[in-house]
Image (cartoon, rainbow, N blue to C red):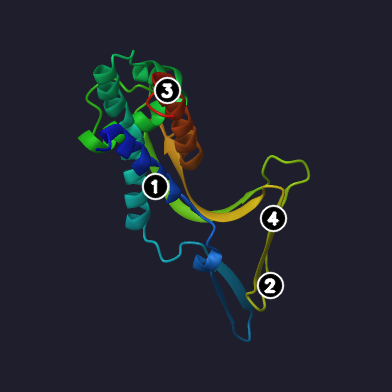
């Protein structure tokens, strides 16, 4: 029987996959005009509403945030030192995601925030993401003909073109603490390291 922690890790990665998609068919090109002028606009939403985006993000935050308790149980069962709290206290991204999760779960934080801030997530939206990868000479290109609506993409050397969910993490004074997609991916990397150290992730 699969251990709950192993299943939770698989859930986390499945939810993480919802942040970004290489399917560009969801991009809609809007064109029109009259005697006065002509316009061309691009909609990256793929029909997703604010609620749709919030549900995707909430699921991901819950899967990452709850790793602490699942790992703590696993460590107790296997007689392994639990270092999840050390990770949260030393890794800013893990702390931010943990606070977002607790805030959503309880409505408001009932204990001092681990990040040192009362955080909230705003301006969730879908947008185009271009990555050049890590190889020398890699590239990614996206272009659109404003008159025909034809889209063209090109990438090489590990580059990629995708549509992803972005958002901003703000503190109680509306100070920007991080971009959500980057923060949650950094948190996942942090937790994977902690899981591997405990022997819970091979």
Which numbered disc flags the more N-terminal residue, 1 or 4? 1
Residue 177 % position (x, y)? 47, 31
**Quarter of the figure with residue 118:** top left
Q: Which residue is mark 4?
A: 155
Decide: few, some or many residues near mark 4? Use Cα within 10 Å; few <14, some 14-19, many ≥20. some
Residue appearing at x 46%, y 25% in the figure: 193
Residue appearing at x 24%, y 32% in the figure: 108
Which numbered disc flags the more N-terminal residue, 3 or 2? 2
**Quarter of the figure with residue 81:** top left
- Left or right: 87, with 77 as reference point: right
Q: Which residue is mark 2?
A: 145
Foreground: disc 1 or disc 2: 1
Assess whether mark 4 and mark 1 are in contact (beta carbons under 8 angstroms).
Answer: no
Distance, label 2 to label 4, CA atoms, is 18 Å
Decide: few, some or many residues near mark 2? Use Cα within 10 Å; few <14, some 14-19, many ≥20. few
Which numbered disc flags the more N-terminal residue, 1 or 2? 1
**Quarter of the figure with residue 197:** top left
Q: Which residue is mark 1?
A: 14
Check the picture and name the quadrant holding the N terminus.
top left
Q: Is residue 196 above or below residue 137?
A: above
22 vs 33, nearest the viewer? 22
Decide: few, some or many residues near mark 3? Use Cα within 10 Å; few <14, some 14-19, many ≥20. many
Foreground: disc 3 or disc 4: 3
Q: Which mark is residue 194?
A: 3
Distance, label 3 to label 4, CA atoms, is 34 Å
**Disc 2 element:** loop
């Amino acid at each position: 029987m699969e251990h709950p922690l192993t299943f939770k890790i698989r859930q986390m990665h499945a939810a993480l996959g919802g942040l970004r998609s290489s399917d560009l068919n969801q991009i809609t090109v809007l064109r029109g005009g009259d005697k006065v002028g002509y316009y061309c606009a691009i909609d990256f939403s793929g029909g997703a509403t604010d609620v749709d985006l919030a549900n995707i993000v909430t699921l991901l935050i819950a899967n990452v945030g709850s790793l602490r308790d699942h790992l703590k149980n696993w460590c107790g069962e296997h007689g392994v030192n639990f270092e999840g709290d050390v990770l949260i206290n030393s890794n800013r991204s893990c702390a931010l995601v943990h606070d977002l999760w607790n805030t959503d779960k309880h409505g408001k934080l009932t204990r001092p925030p681990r990040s040192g801030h009362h955080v909230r997530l705003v301006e969730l939206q879908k947008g185009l993401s271009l990555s050049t990868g890590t190889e020398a000479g890699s590239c990614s290109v996206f272009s659109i003909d404003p008159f025909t609506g034809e889209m063209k993409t090109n990438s090489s050397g590990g580059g990629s073109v995708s549509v992803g969910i972005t958002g901003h993490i703000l503190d109680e004074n509306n100070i920007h603490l991080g971009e959500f997609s980057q923060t949650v991916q950094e948190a996942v990397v942090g937790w994977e390291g902690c899981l591997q150290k405990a022997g819970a992730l091979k």
